[in-house]
Image (cartoon, helix red, strand yellow):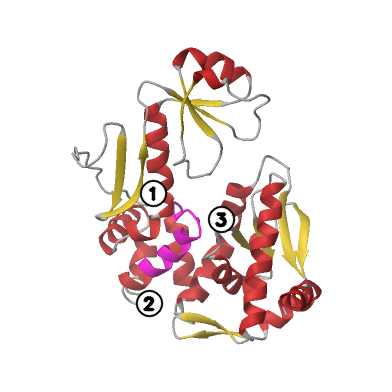
Amino acid sequence: MGIILPKIRVRDNLQLGELEYRILVQGNPADEGVIEPNCLLAVDTGLASAPVNPDSIRGIFSENLHAEPAYWIAPEAEQAASESGYVIMTATDVLAGQLRELSIQYAPQLLTRDAAKQLIDETQKSSPSVVNELIPDQLSLAEVQQILKSLVAEGVSIRPLGLILETLGDHARKDKNRWTLAEKVRQRLGKHITHQLSPGRHQPIHVFTFSEELEHRIACAWEREQDDIKLNLPVPVVEGIANAIQDAARKMMASGNRPIALVDQAIRPVIAKLSIDSPVDIVVLGSQEALEVPVQVVGEINTEQLNAAASSAA
């Protein structure tokens, strides 16, 4: 993600069981569970051809952040589980994976003002003109931090920070709105974003879209209200759109695809906001970000679906 992680402190907690762990982020519980140090974890990523031998199972790993079936197994069952298509992980690998996933999930909270300044100071060593022209004359450190946080909140890596700051410098004199500037950065980082989403070289990204009519309706109804986004449509319509997004995402997951919505760049911030509370992790990709990558549309949300859902609810 390109952020600097704080130091990780490890200490005993007598309130936890012998095999239990708890991970705190900024002093608040973020994850907890059980680690079996003398076992291996067999994870079914969808490729397992046979169930794990019940006699070798020592426990179920319910803390898996990806909700994939995972079982603690005896070490001697490793070869059989591996040959059946399970991914085998040690207890250390599991805990490191949990920390990695949580660092991504909590990236906006970890990107503090001091952390942002440290990143910018490092970038200044290689790109002094870019930083000096932007901060503080065009944007303050706090404003840049908020834009960076909005990017990592949607899973966009800020590793190309020099390019990000250069883009902000190109547009900040005309418009200092956080949403507008973040969208300009996303467009500039289009290749970086789509590369993260691509299933493989020359393979299309599977997406669901919105009908042209529905996109136009949304585009005419949303506005920026100070530092927030407001969608001026009846509440049932807004809820219907949010539900349709979740349904489309679930269908993509059921077919083995990562849920990705491809929408007109003008409404991308709105759809991203409607998707943020979804129990399914949805990527909202703008049309200008995907100009140079093949896509395959596997579903569409349209006005007729919303009307039908509203009629059924009534």
Magenta stretch in the rendered image: 145-160
Q: Residue at x 40, y 48 (%)?
A: 102
Q: State which tag comes first along the sequence, 1 or 3.
A: 1
Q: Earlier in the sequence, mark 2 or mark 1?
A: 1
- Locate residue 243 relative to residue 69 in the image: left or right: right
Label 3, residues with CA under 10 Å away: few <14, some 14-19, many ≥20: some
Q: Are marks 2 and 3 in contact (CB under 8 Å)?
A: no
Q: On the image, numbered disc 1 is attached to which residue? A: 103
Residue 148 on the magenta segment: yes
Q: Nearer the viewer, mark 1 or mark 3?
A: 3
Location of residue 112 (image quadrant): bottom left
Report crowding for label 1: few under 14, some 14 to 19, many 20 or more residues within 10 A (C-alpha): some
Tell me which amino acid carries mark 3.
Asp
Tell me if residue 102 comes above or below residue 248 in the rendering: above
Q: Position of residue 141 (x, y in %)?
A: 31, 69
Estimate the x, y position of residue 121 in percent, counting from the top left: 29, 57
- Which of the image's four quarters has the C terminus? bottom right
Q: Which residue is mark 2?
A: 138
Per the image, the residue denoted by label 3 is 281
Tell me which numbered mark, 2 or 3, is placed earlier along the sequence.
Answer: 2
Q: Quick check: can you spot residue 234?
A: yes
Q: Nearer the viewer, residue 278 or 132?
A: 278
